[in-house]
Amino acid sequence: MTPAEQKKAAAAKAAEYVEDGMKLGIGTGSTSEEFVRVLAERVKGGLRVIGVPTSERTAKLCTELGVPLTNLDDTPHLDLTIDGADEFDPALRLIKGGGGALLREKIVAAASDRMIVITDATKKVAMLGAFPLPIEVIPFGSLATVRRVAEVAKAYGCEGKIARRADSYGEPFFTDSNNFIFDCSFGRIPDPDGLARELNLIPGVVETGLFIGIATLALVGTSSGVDIIEPK
Ligand SMILES: O=C[C@H](O)[C@H](O)[C@H](O)COP(=O)(O)O
């Protein structure tokens, strides 16, 4: 299977974990969009679920396809979140935020009893960090914040280019919460737990794309099927 087919296969498998009456967190990105398509078919067939989308983009697709939506104010406790990832390691620690949705994704996953990650096989790594780590930062004083990010990262063995994300016109990219994203090309992150903890203490850092201890299962499309991976 190609990576695109692997994403579809993982998304289809994830739909098997959805039960009637569930309150769902619904992720962002190309793999999550495949999941929304499968979920919408099941909803057409009579499945009753309600979802909290993790981005405006996902909300739009769910609305177009007829997946009923709510929000965390009305539904603060969810049964299950299904979302993609940019990288995962054997402990199911993740890098997320390639699509800029990391903040809402983490809030929604944290409000859920379980989080199932759906990916293609290319996302599996022995050590996180080949994918640039997205960090969401308040625009006010962002360069001062990022200077501190670089210092903290260095103390955790991480160095590399840190670049403010731009949109396709070269203008600053703004998240759904109107913040900047800085992508940190560290190459390797030897201590993701420590780095995540310390980065979150920096004033101006809203959230990082490191998801630690959140994912409970990964469904990974491979060349021959879907691997079911539990955290080691
Ligand atoms: O902000 C975006 C999300 O974290 C996505 O879940 C992540 O980037 C994976 O996206 P895709 O499924 O398109 O590879």
Image (cartoon, rainbow, N blue to C red):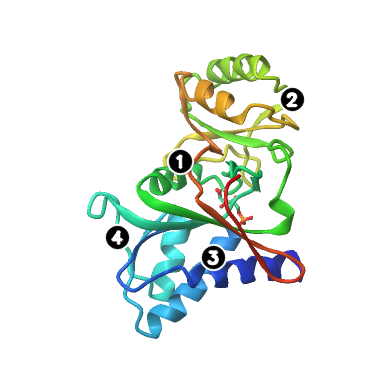
Q: Which residue type does callout 3 highlight?
A: Glu
Assign the N terminus to one quadrant of the image: bottom right
Mark number displayed over residue 160: 2
Other-residue count near label 1 (Cα within 10 Å), few / some / many at <14 / 14–19 / ≥20: many
On residue 103, the disc is: 1
Gap in angstroms between the C-alphas marked 2 and 3: 32 Å
Earlier-in-chain disc, 2 versus 4: 4
Give the amino acid type for the residue marked by disc 2 in the picture.
Gly
Question: Mark 1 or mark 3, which has the lower sequence index?
Answer: 3
The residue tagged with tag 2: helix, strand or loop? loop
Q: Is disc 2 in contact with disc 4, using a CB cutoff of under 8 Å?
A: no
- In the image, residue 12 lies at what x, y percent? 56, 73
Instruction: Please give the count of numbered marks on the rendered protein.
Output: 4
Q: Relative to 17, is 158 on the left or the right?
A: right
Element under label 1? helix
Q: Earlier in the sequence, mark 1 or mark 2?
A: 1
Separation (CA) of disc 1 from disc 3: 18 Å
Q: CA separation, marks 1 and 2?
A: 23 Å
- Residue, x 73% and y 26% (percent of image)? 161
x and y, in percent, of residue 203 in the image: 44, 18
Label 3: few (<14), some (14–19) or many (≥20) C-alpha neighbours in 10 Å: many
Picture residue at 75% right of the left edge, 32% below the top: 187
Residue type (three-letter) at the residue carrying disc 4: Thr
| Residue placed under numbered mark 4 in the picture | 70
Give the spatial CA distance, label 2 vs label 4: 40 Å
